[in-house]
Image (cartoon, rainbow, N blue to C red):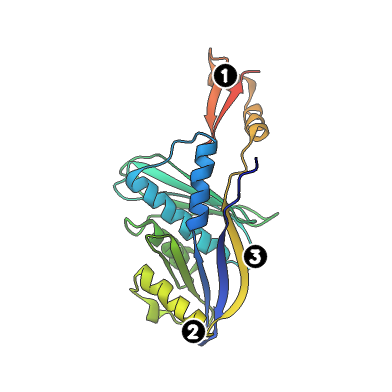
Amino acid sequence: MVEELHLSSYRRLLWRRHHALVVRGSFAEARFCRDLYEARHGIAAASGTAAVELDRALAALALAGVALVERESWGISVTLPGRDYGLFVGLEAEGMICGRVGPAERDGALAVVQRQRAGGPLVQSTFEPPGADVVEVFEEYYRRVEQVPTRLGVTDGWEGALIQSLPGGELSFADGLPAGELTDLIDRKIAAGDMEPMHEVLIFYECRCNDDLIRAMISSVSGDARADLFGREPALLIECPRCGRGYSVRCG
């Protein structure tokens, strides 16, 4: 039986009055899709604060990815101040998103952003998170690396909104607005016809990993290094670094 695919819809709009690009959507369906994916592959789900921050990072990445004129692949690793775990979230050009929680040094707060267009070079940026909110990492990336004024918010229910300044734009009206007020403002303006729809993007939770990909990764390791990796074990359990799915790989 084929499992139903739960898709989150994101709209990209133009707000001419403020010379701004707007993205509005909800991560709720893709969040439910993540639960199904983890249950299907026996992945231990994150819990507590780590689970909440992973969901917020995924929802924020969906907004950032949809904001682009040309789709790209993203990979973002974040360790927030005071955390003994790190987050990874990744988004493919076609809308496939995934993420996981992993161990990290408590005093090693860092954000690493990698982006790549189809056929283009991998571009990496590294900076310190501005605080303990993972959503602010994305605003900091746009401020520090892209130098594009951007306001981004994700509510507790995974509703999300992004406003990004175009040349000549000014976003001071959105400064300090809580995520719920930001999404409500955009919804009102959409309903009033103040924004021009551009296109819709569908986001879904899935990972590219499979048995062939993992075997190819192990095969690329040199013979001596592979021997050290396996030791006396006939097989290894290897986790996908992007989603945490486990694979059993036999030696040889």
Q: What residue type is labelled 3?
A: Glu
Q: Residue furthest top?
A: 232
Indicate the secondary structure of the residue bearing disc 3: loop
Q: Distance between the residues labelled 3 and 2?
A: 22 Å
Residue 249 locus on image (x, y percent): 60, 24
Secondary structure beneath dot 1 equals: strand
Comes first in the chain, label 3 or label 2: 2
Most extreme residue toward the front, as rendered? 1
Residue 67 appears in the figure: no
Kindly report which numbered mark, 1 or 3, lies closer to the viewer in this rendering.
Answer: 1
Give the numbered dot on residue 245: none
Quick one: label 1, few (<14), some, or many (20+) residues within 10 Å? Answer: some
On screen, residue 45 versus residue 93, left or right, reads left
Residue 99: where, in percent of width, then height?
Answer: 49, 46
Q: Name the spot of residue 8 as percent of width and height, x first.
A: 55, 59
**Circle number at residue 70:** 3
What's the residue type where badge 2 is placed?
His
* Of the image marks 1 and 3, the number of the one nearer the N terminus: 3
Quadrant in the picture for the C terminus: top right
Q: How far apart are marks 1 and 3 (CA)?
A: 42 Å
Element marked by disc 2: helix
**In-front residue for pair 195/36:** 36
Left or right of 177 in this view: 149: right
Q: Residue 18 carries which label?
A: 2
Badge 2 or badge 1: first in the primary sequence: 2
Q: Which residue in the protein does label 1 denote?
A: 235
x%, y% of residue 166?
Answer: 53, 78
x 64%, y 54%: residue:
121
